[in-house]
Image (cartoon, rainbow, N blue to C red):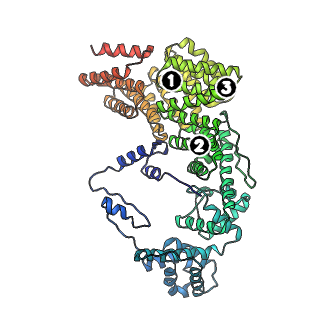
């Protein structure tokens, strides 16, 4: 079995970077990691490993510090603390037991549990029994390296302790112990364990309790468990020795099937309207979870996030392409609600390669669309356009009219974010015509909302309002609250454009209320920006500033840096209204810095540069303001829609 994980992602999350803010590309992630570690002179990096790491010493000048075994006194203290203090008359033999365990904490804990479980057996007899286990092990090759010989002796001792405890397990618990080594993630729950064992949930829990009691797995919060690294390696070795490869393969297939079916059950609550794919055939002995609420489905997804990525990668590595690409599609429908860009891009790439290896053109189109959505949402617009165009081509070739409309909508969104507004409108209208012909009310509503947004941005408020109201009615009828909230956001934009400030406040406030009611930070973080604009129009500057600050906080947690920049820009405008000019300048400079870092966002960058210039002018720094306006005019080149034309004219007038 082959499983992999991006170790560098673990480093970045440990340094405080939100998982959603971690770049999908390894090189970009490495650059971010180096930036975070570029501290003052004298800062050091500690690298740990069970090997000597000679390359770091020879190539990079690292200083090697050998961490010795626990001193005998500390090892004996650990045994006492682990439950052996009651053997008052046998304390003298604790040092001997510690020596047999190589004075290594994992082995000491397992041995202590085994001894504690047999309180009437003399410790000397138990130590003799433990020593006999060493003779049953295949001795590893030691070579001529004395350090290697010491490590091999330690390995013998560890394996002897583990084997001693392992042989005392009931047969079903021992089988589960071996099967758990096939799980790809850092931790697991009873459901995945039951699928690996091909047993019911209750039987799996009994075996898990037996393993935890023997300290062969570690229990965690929420009924979760995890392996110590050494115990996982030992379990994998036992599995390779004792289980047939066919049985191991079936266990992996059952586990992956459990993840697909359970993720699909979660998706039906989290994002039920999205197009699904037929799942792989069900497996005997697999009991996927069911959910009775949106919150329950989200909690499961959040607990299993790392495992779902690892399972997708594992399906591909273990030559199960159907499982790999279909799990990726199921996850896409969840990721759309939360924008975890790193996970989304990683699983989509894995699924795309799996679909191609299987020659499944429908799967290829689905994963190209998924990649395009992830790239577009993370503001990598050129990549998004490339992926969606490739998906559109496949769908046209195969006669998939519904899929073709999906791709048209997706390309329209790329054009909208690139401010190619007329191209966006054309794509949305073509897609909406297809869905009307297919009598698909849900997707007709989505396209109607997008048509309305394009018309708002073009200044066509009369044309925008009917389509937005139509979308709002369709979403409300279907109780699709995400679409309803977005339509309310757009309705607020129309009302602001017509100076209907109370109406704008009402619509934007209702949108934010939906986001908060459903606990969706992605919705709330974006829709708060429209509420802040309506509040500024109403003269509620303090409320607008607070709304933008909340949006900054949410976007920082989500990891959407471009929308975070929009929130900083909005905060700068509200601060300027309150004559907090220093804060206003700081906010606008933050927005400009982020938008320059993330290229391809010329329109919001032009707006932020203009806002910065306005604030600098208010601070009597005309030369700096002119420079900022000059940069804004450069970013505006190529935009000819009414709003861009008005902004260009105003800047030119201001700089004369």
Q: In the depicted view, which residue is nearer to us: 519 or 265?
A: 265
**Residue 303: x, y in percent?**
59, 50
Left or right position of 618 against 440: left
SS state under label 2: helix
Mark closer to the chain start, 2 or 3: 2
Identify the residue shown where x is 63% and y is 69%: 241
Residue 238 occupies quadrant: bottom right
Identify the residue shown where x is 47% and y is 40%: 559
Q: Nearer the viewer, mark 3 or mark 1?
A: 3
Q: CA distance from mark 2 to mark 3?
A: 23 Å
Left or right position of 347 against 59: right
Q: Is residue 89 above or below residue 110?
A: below
Q: Which mark is residue 351?
A: 2
Mark 2 surroundings: few (<14), some (14-19) or many (≥20) residues within 10 A? many
Left or right position of 482 against 597: right
Mark 3 surroundings: few (<14), some (14-19) or many (≥20) residues within 10 A? some
**Residue 156: x, y in percent?**
52, 76
Left or right position of 360 against 160: right
**Do tag 2 and tag 1 residues touch (Cβ < 8 Å)?**
no
Look at mark 1 in the image and give the residue it sits on: 416
**Residue 314: x, y in percent?**
59, 52
**Residue 351: x, y in percent?**
59, 43
Look at mark 3 in the image and give the residue it sits on: 401
Residue 482 occupies quadrant: top right
User: Would residue 501 be visible to someone looking at this image?
Assistant: no
Identify the residue shown where x is 32% and y is 59%: 59
SS state under label 1: helix
């Amino acid at each position: 079995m082959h499983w992999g994980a991006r170790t560098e992602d673990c480093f970045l999350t440990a340094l405080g970077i939100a998982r959603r803010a971690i770049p999908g590309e390894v090189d970009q992630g490495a650059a971010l990691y180096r930036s975070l570690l570029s501290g003052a002179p004298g800062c050091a990096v500690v690298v740990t490993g069970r090997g000597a790491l000679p390359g770091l010493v020879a190539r990079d000048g690292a200083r090697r510090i050998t961490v010795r075994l626990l001193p005998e006194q500390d090892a004996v203290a650990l045994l006492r603390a682990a439950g052996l203090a009651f053997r008052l008359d046998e304390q003298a033999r604790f040092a001997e037991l510690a020596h047999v365990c190589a004075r290594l904490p994992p082995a000491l804990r397992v041995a202590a549990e085994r001894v504690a479980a047999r309180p009437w057996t003399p410790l000397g007899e138990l130590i003799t029994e433990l020593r006999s286990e060493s003779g049953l092990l295949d001795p590893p090759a030691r070579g001529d390296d004395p350090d290697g010989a010491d490590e091999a002796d330690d390995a013998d001792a560890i394996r002897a302790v583990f084997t001693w405890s392992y042989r005392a397990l009931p047969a079903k618990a021992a089988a589960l112990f071996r099967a758990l080594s096939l799980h790809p993630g850092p931790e697991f729950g009873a459901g995945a364990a039951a699928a690996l064992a091909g047993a019911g949930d209750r039987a799996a829990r009994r075996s898990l309790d037996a393993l935890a009691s023997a300290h062969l797995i570690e229990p965690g919060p929420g009924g979760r468990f995890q392996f110590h690294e050494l115990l996982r390696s030992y379990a994998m070795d036992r599995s390779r020795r004792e289980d047939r490869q066919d049985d191991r393969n079936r266990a992996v297939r059952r586990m992956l099937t459990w993840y697909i079916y359970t993720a699909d059950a979660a998706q039906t609550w989290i994002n039920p309207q999205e197009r699904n794919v037929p799942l792989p055939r069900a497996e005997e002995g697999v009991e996927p979870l069911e959910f009775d609420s949106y919150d329950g489905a989200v909690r499961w997804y959040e607990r299993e996030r790392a495992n779902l990525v690892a399972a997708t990668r594992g399906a591909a590595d273990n030559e199960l392409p159907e499982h790999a690409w279909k799990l990726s599609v199921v996850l896409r429908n969840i990721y759309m609600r939360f924008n975890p860009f790193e996970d989304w891009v990683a699983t989509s790439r894995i699924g795309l390669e799996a679909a191609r290896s299987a020659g499944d053109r429908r799967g290829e189109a689905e994963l190209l669309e998924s990649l395009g959505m992830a790239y577009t949402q993370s503001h990598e617009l050129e990549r998004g356009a490339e992926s969606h165009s490739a998906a559109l081509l496949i769908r046209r070739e195969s006669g998939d009219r519904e899929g073709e409309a999906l791709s048209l909508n997706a390309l329209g969104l790329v054009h909208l974010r690139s401010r190619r507004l007329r191209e966006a409108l054309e794509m949305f209208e073509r897609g909406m015509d297809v869905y009307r012909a297919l009598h698909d009310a849900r997707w007709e509503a989505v396209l109607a909302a997008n048509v309305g947004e394009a018309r708002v941005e073009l200044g066509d408020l009369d044309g925008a309002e009917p389509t937005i109201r139509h979308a709002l009615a369709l979403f409300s009828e279907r109780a699709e609250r995400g679409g309803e909230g977005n339509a309310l956001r757009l309705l607020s934009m129309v009302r602001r454009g017509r100076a209907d400030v109370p109406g704008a406040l009402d619509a934007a406030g209702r949108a934010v209320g939906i986001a908060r009611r459903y606990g969706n930070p992605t919705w709330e973080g974006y829709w708060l920006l429209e509420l802040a604009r309506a509040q500024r129009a109403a003269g509620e500057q303090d409320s607008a500033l607070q709304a933008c600050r909340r949006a900054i906080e949410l976007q920082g947690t989500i990891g959407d840096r471009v929308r975070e920049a929009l929130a900083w820009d909005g905060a700068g405008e509200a601060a300027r209204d309150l004559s907090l000019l220093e804060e206003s300048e700081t906010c606008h400079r933050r927005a400009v810095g982020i938008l320059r870092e993330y290229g391809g966002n010329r329109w919001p960058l032009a707006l932020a540069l203009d806002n910065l210039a306005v604030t600098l002018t208010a601070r009597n720094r005309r030369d700096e303001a002119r420079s900022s306006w000059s940069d804004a005019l450069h970013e505006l080149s190529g935009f000819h829609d009414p709003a861009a034309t008005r902004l260009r004219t105003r800047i030119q007038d201001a700089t004369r």
